[in-house]
Amino acid sequence: MSLRKITAVITAAAAVLSLSLSAYADNLTYHSGYDRTGLTVSASAAVLIEADTGTVLYAKNEKEHRSIASTTKIMTALLTLEAGELDKRFTVDPIAINVEGTSMGLKKGDTVTRRALCVGMLLPSGNDAANAAAVNVAGSMTAFAEMMNKKAAALGMSDSRFVTPSGLDADGQYSCAYDMALLTRYALKNETFREICGSVKMQAEYGNPPYLRTLVNSNKLLYSYDGCVGVKTGFTDNAGRTLVSAAERDGVTLIAVTLNAPDDWQDHTAMFDYGFEKVKVTDASYDCSSLRVPVIGGETDDIGVKAQYPAELPLTDEQRSQVTVTVYLPKFLYAGVIAGDTVGEIRYELYGTQLCNVPLLAAESCAAEQQELSFFAACVKFIRNLLNL
């Protein structure tokens, strides 16, 4: 049976077997100052989340509105990458690149690509790169700021407002530690973003005429913390030191954010050490051995099902008993099922948030039952064979 037919059967006549491993639990996020960790950080505001589940593992003033400096470029680079045409060359806007602060070294008349600008934003934190990208993508920095705020709203960043693509201080521009974690959680799903922000150094070609340069990342956690995969540093006199970083170990991805943190490298090291001790990948797979689906018109009355792969989830000890499992299977299948066909799915949720879906496959085949031919049909078949029709 085709997947489309099976999906239709599941949608139209699904028997939902809600098999909860435990009672629902209160969501642990959104508690400003929530801390049973014993961690002490220098930051005025901070948050640590597990990327797959979004679970807040540590928080300190995480919803407080603050300046975020060049960590703003996470949003700018993301929108530039999502705009596409990454390797199309163009001449930078001379007014846009005339900006103070850190730079990738753009000059009037330089030819560049959007990809190179993203490298310039995320590694040496070029304000010129951010402005040039904004004008090229949206036509003006004002229009680009509108794009930034629209994206922020779509991601649920309810405590953020963007004015400049570079992160230089501007009236009305702010975000919070939690929103920056949300943004980074989304941005890390973009493979090009991951590649760039996780590189200690990269080559980019630009200039007049263009030539290859090597740009170096300002995020020293990339070589000082095992498993660090990015993301972005920042500093202004008003914001202080800001840092968004991510690290992966043993199937667990953590995202840490600190705002106004005099000792940000140590803050992130301590938060990551705590998070990797707290969260472990757990096999939360549901036992499918007793699940069977009736088959109509088949040689057998029903078939067994199996999960396509294990449900390996990054969970804390407390969360392991809070995972909710729901099995979706059709009331019946028509004969002609082949072992390996998708016939349903298992959904795993935590505190109402979907963690993953695991397809359920037919564990065995079931051919249609052979019907005896009627006397008339048998005669027709005999005559056709006789005449070689």
Image (cartoon, rainbow, N blue to C red):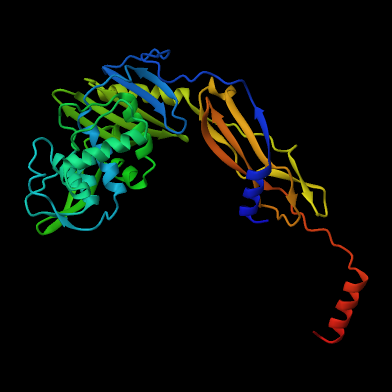
- Above or below, 176 against 292 in this view is above
What residue occupies the far bottom of the structure in this picture?
387
- Above or below, 43 against 256 in this view is above
Q: Which of 364 and 263 is in front in this view?
A: 364
Question: Horizontal and vertical percent for residue 140?
Answer: 16, 45
Query: In the rendered image, which quarter contains the N terminus?
Result: bottom right
Identified at 40% across, 26% down, the residue is 49
- Above or below, 371 against 310 in this view is below
The quarter of the displayed image where residue 240 is located: top left
Query: In the rendered image, which quarter contains the C terminus?
Result: bottom right
The quarter of the displayed image where residue 111 is located: bottom left
Q: Which of 370 and 323 is in front in this view?
A: 370
Question: Horizontal and vertical percent for residue 278?
Answer: 47, 22
Q: Nearer the viewer, residue 262 or 15?
A: 15
The quarter of the displayed image where residue 188 is located: top left
In the rendered structure, the answer to whether residue 259 lies left or right of residue 2 reads left
Question: Horizontal and vertical percent for residue 302?
Answer: 79, 46
Question: Horizontal and vertical percent for residue 244?
Answer: 29, 30
- Above or below, 15 against 64 in this view is below
Q: Which of 125 and 170 is in front in this view?
A: 170
In the rendered structure, the answer to whether residue 77 lies left or right of residue 280 reads left
Identified at 32% across, 38% down, the residue is 151
Q: Can see residue 360?
A: no
